[in-house]
Amino acid sequence: QQQQQQQQQQQEPQEDETEKRHWQDFCLWKATKPQEEAIASWKTEIGTGRPGWHLECSAMARKYLGDSIDVHCGGIDLKFPHHENEIAQSQGSTGKPFCNCWIHNGFVNIEGDKMSKSLGNFLTLKTACPTAVDVRAYRYLVVTSQYRAALSFTQANMQSAKKSLQRIDKVKHKIQTA
């Protein structure tokens, strides 16, 4: 378990772990690229394009949750520019604080690599946990992991979670039959 904790600490994302560093990463309007579909853009006075995706999140949060919200969650990779854009847009629009508490979770790593569609190691819960035992083990793995650290999804960690649950079930049974 100590070795698992050390590995987890080594895999923790850093606050500034992002490729986005330029002022143009903040975007309210994105120009249409030649390879993008025409149905995802509109002609305007400033050119053909679409709203920046951060703007949609600010608009939805305001519509459904109000001008200020208590808690906002997301992956550490969304802290900048996504969440900073939401703050700037929402507070600029309302003059009120956008969010009282931010919670940023670590990445999910699959066998040591960050889970990513582009790497081809993307899993859904349905494929990763085909049985009820697997689902329960995954839940245990998640709740026993530090939320800001990377979640290391490996077969070894899933087996360890299953064994832990078997020990818990054994103790529970002894208590119930005592």
Image: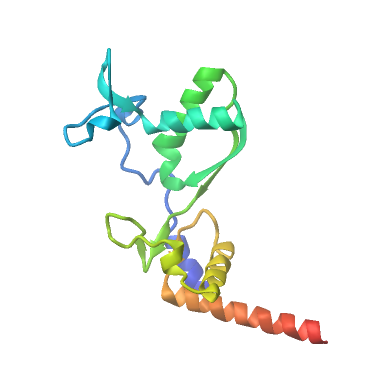
Residue displayed at 59% across by 63% down: 143
User: As rendered, which of 18 and 73 lies closer to the eye?
Assistant: 73
- Residue 25 position in % (x across, y down): 32, 31
Given the current orientation, which residue lies at the most extreme front position?
39
Relative to 171, 133 lies left or right: left
Of the pair 171 and 80, the residue shown nearer to us: 171
Residue 61 at x, y = what percent?
Answer: 54, 32
Residue located 47% across and 70% down the image? 129
Image quarter of residue 166:
bottom right
Residue placed farthest to the left in the image?
34
Query: Relative to 144, is 83 on the left or the right?
Result: left
Q: Residue at x 52, y 68 (%)?
A: 138
Name which quarter of the figure residue 111 lies in. Answer: bottom left
Total labels drawn: 0
Image location of residue 164, percent across then percent down: 59, 78
Position of residue 114 relative to residue 98, above or below, is below
Residue placed most toward the observer, 66 or 111: 66
**Image point 61% across, 28% down: which residue?**
66
Q: Is residue 154 placed above or below 44 in the rendered structure?
A: below
Seen in the picture, residue 46 relative to 26 is either above or below; the reply is above
Direction top: furthest residue: 45
On the rendered image, what quadrant is the C terminus found in? Answer: bottom right
Write down the quadrant of residue 45 in the picture.
top left
User: Please, which colouring scheme is shown?
Assistant: rainbow
